[in-house]
Structures are given as structure tokens and as C-alpha cells.
Image: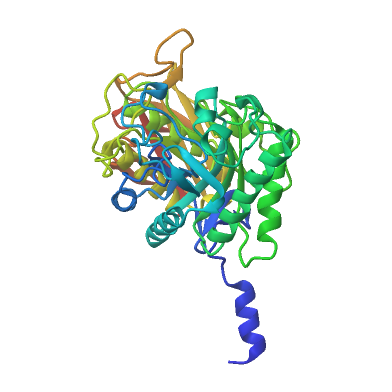
Amino acid sequence: MKTWLLLALACVAPAQTLRLHPENLRYYEFQGRPVVLVSSAEHYGALLNRDFDYGKYLDTLAAEGMNLTRIFTGAYKEFPGDFGIIGNTLAPAEGSYLTPWKETGPGKWDLNEWNPEYFERLHGLMDRAAKHGIVVEVTLFTAYYNQQRWEASPLHPSSNVNATPAVPYTESLTLKHASLVERQTALVRKLVSELNRYDNLLWEICNEPYFAGVAMDWQWHIARTVAEAERTLPKRHLVAQNIANHQGVVRDPDPNVNVFHFHYARPPVAVKQNAELRGVIGFDESGFDGTNEAIYRIQGWDFLFAGGGHYNNLDYSFTVGHEDGTFAVPASLPGFGSAALRRQLRTLRELFEGMNFVRMEPKEDFVAAGVPEGASARTLGEDGRQYAVYLHHGRLMSGHLPQFVVDRRRKLMQLEVRLPKGRWSVEWIHPRTGKREHAEQIEHGGGVRRVSSPAYQEDVALMFTAL
């Protein structure tokens, strides 16, 4: 084959590394295909907790159709009982906390020495995830929330032999203390150099930086450090920024950031608020709404049908000893996870994979009438070709615990939609069971069309595909 042809094929060959989809920057492309990232993943300790069998965990995610996990790097840990969590993987048992730095004694680290065991485990985790096509979101730092958690970090002077500055936790992730920033910058550069080879990588600057004094200029510095470190390396990776809990408008986006994360983004107001951003909008942590699987299924489906491209439920059914996600989450916990919930999220991901979703966008006027009182409906559509409607009976209720309440009664519905002229395939999908029914073909002359739902419970989806 001629050299010029080889070069031409190389230019048009799809990229394997996770990136923004070139046809629609609101979605990802991974391994040459458009993807939405959908997961119900453990509480971020898979790397730093020696006792956690990440192999069994990743095998379980893959078998259940999840394609994302999120990990913290080891500059932070929690304590048993924090946030009311049982079996918290971010609260390793004594002697099981693994960090990037060499441990010199119980609770003491040398920041001048990297820890080979840590990087061996990191590569093992990344390789296993890559084998399964699972994207690993590497969250470089997190707010420390209180002084106790800051003092447990290897970066605090009481936990290292390097005399780092004794600053309050509210100044630990700022640019106020140059020697501390140098240590943080060195960690970022080391991780970037170690992980550059991987396609299944998404960087995140900091978890929940809107707490505990995390500075915006420090976040820009970390994102710039990633970009500069990758400049001389073969691969470029996306960088995510955690914007806010619930919602918020991004008014001055960092030029090195391509993914914008929100926590507890229900309802998905943040997607519409940031419709002009060039990048993926993600719902990257759920919880604190009780232990009913319908809650977190609805939140994931609702967010993606609003135009988001990324959903990660915080799943407490993954613990040490239950890396297959079989821990029975008690009602006292702030969130939920189960194999049943993961099946329902798999149905969401597979539904998107069956659509040409990169050509779809929110269509607020598609549903003309018939939405039951207290329900919410969202539509994604490509004009004249495909429309997907999602309707659910969950809503926020102020002064109520949990705040997110789902009406579980069985229902029927007469929905009116503004459907273009043509011949259409119509099908109903039950997110709770994955069942599809009432498939039919219709001829429509254009304008409002009434469709009758099957009996459904909690939520239902409706697909129109041009024939």
C-alpha cells in the first residue's frame, strides 16, 4: 500500500483514547465509538485500600454492563463511620492505607520517595479496567472537610518526615503555601507520566472543591499542570472539574477543562444551565436520598435524557469482602446500590447505544400534553429521524426525608406528541425491568399524535424511529 494512503487512513482512523466526540462535544468517544459513561461504582477506595479486591470488583462492573469507575489517589482517607457509611472503602483498616509515597513507619510517609507497591497496584487496576473497556476517572485531590482528615493525609506534617507546612485544612488546597503546592504538583506530574499510556483514563482535578476552602486558582494550576505534563507525551486525556452540588452556571470555564461534573444533580437543571459549554456535563455522585433503587435509576435516566453524558451512582453494595456488589445496603445508609439497580442502569446504557444519540438534542416541545400530574417528561430527538421520551414519577420534596420521593403506583397514560409526517416504529421500554412492549408501526400525517402507554410503574420510556 502506498505511503500516502497509509497516512490518509491514519488521519481518518478513529481515536481509541477517551475524548469528546468530534460531531457532538456534549458526548464522549471511546475506542472509536460514541459512548455515554454509566455506572454504579464503589466509594472511590479501590486503589488506596489494600484489602479491596479490585479485580473482582472490575470483573463485576464489566459483567453487569457498567463502563466507569472513579478512584481517589491516596492523598486522602476517611475513618470508619464517616458520613454514616458502613464498609466505606475510603476508610481502610489499620495497615491497609496505600499511598503514592513510601511509608517509613505507622502513619508516616517520606514524600521524597515513591511507593513501588502503589504504582504496581495502580497499573494492575488500570490494566484490568482497560481489558473490560471501563473508563477510570482518576480524582487527583479532594476537599478534606475537617482537620482530622487533613492530618491523616501524608501531605500533613504530622504524617510525613518532610516538614511540610502546618496549615489549616481550609488552606491545604490553595496556592498560599509554595512548598505544599510543589508536593502536590510533583504528585500530579508523576501520575500523568505513569498513566499516559492508557486510553481508558479521565482526570478529575478535585472532588467537591466547593467545600473547605479549595481555591479556584489552585484548581486552574492543577489542570494546567496536567496539560503541560502531557504536552511532551504521546496521549492527551480529558480533564474534568467538579463544579457544584445540585446545579450552577459555569461562567468562566478553564481552557484546560473539557468535562463538567455535578453531584446530586436532581432534577438535572445543570444540563440546561450550561447548554453553551463545549464539553460533557456529568452527574458524578448520587446519594443522600434513601435506599430505594428507583430513586437512583430515575436520577440517571432523567439526567441522560436531559442531555447529560455521564452518570455515576455512588454504590455502597461494594465493600471489602463484597467486591461483587452483594453487600445488602441497610436502610440507615445515605445512598444505595445493588445488582438490580445496575441492571436498570445497563438498560439505560444499552438504550443509548441503540440510538444515534450524538445527533440528538433536548426537545422541550415534543411532548404536547398528557403528562400526569406530578410527573416529569424529557425528550431527546433528531428532527424527522428519532425521538426518545422518558417520563418518571419522582420529585424533590422540601422538608421531607428522603428529599427525593417516587410515586410507585401503577399507571396508564395517554401521551400527545408533536410527531413529524412519516412512517414510524413506536416502542415502550420499562426501565425497571428492561421489558419492551407495544411495538407497532404507524403512518402519521404530521402534527400531534396520541399514543397509549401500557401499564407501568415509577417510570417509562418511549421510542419513535423513522422507517
Quarter location, residue 430: top left
Quadrant containing the C terminus in the rendered view: bottom left
Q: Decide if residue 442 is on the left or right side of residue 184.
A: left
Residue 129 lies, in percent from the top left, at 40, 56
Q: What residue is shown at x 24% (from left), y 34% (from top)?
A: 327
**How many dots with numbers?**
0
- Say if residue 180 shows up in the picture: yes
Residue 354 lies, in percent from the top left, at 42, 53
Q: What residue is shown at x 62% (from left), y 67% (from top)?
A: 234
Q: Residue furthest top?
A: 399
Q: What residue is shown at x 72% (from left), y 43% (from top)?
A: 221
Q: Note whether 330 is above or below 240 in the view shown.
A: above
Q: Decide if residue 202 is on the left or right side of residue 317.
A: right
Q: Residue furthest bottom?
A: 2
Residue 401 lies, in percent from the top left, at 40, 12
Quarter location, residue 228: bottom right
Residue 390 lies, in percent from the top left, at 44, 34
Quarter location, residue 429: top left
- Say if residue 146 shows up in the picture: no
Residue placed most toward the observer, 178 or 327: 178
Colour approach in the figure: rainbow
Q: Note whether 170 is above or below 297 in the view shown.
A: above
Q: What residue is shown at x 67% (from left), y 87% (from top)?
A: 4
Quadrant containing the N terminus in the rendered view: bottom right
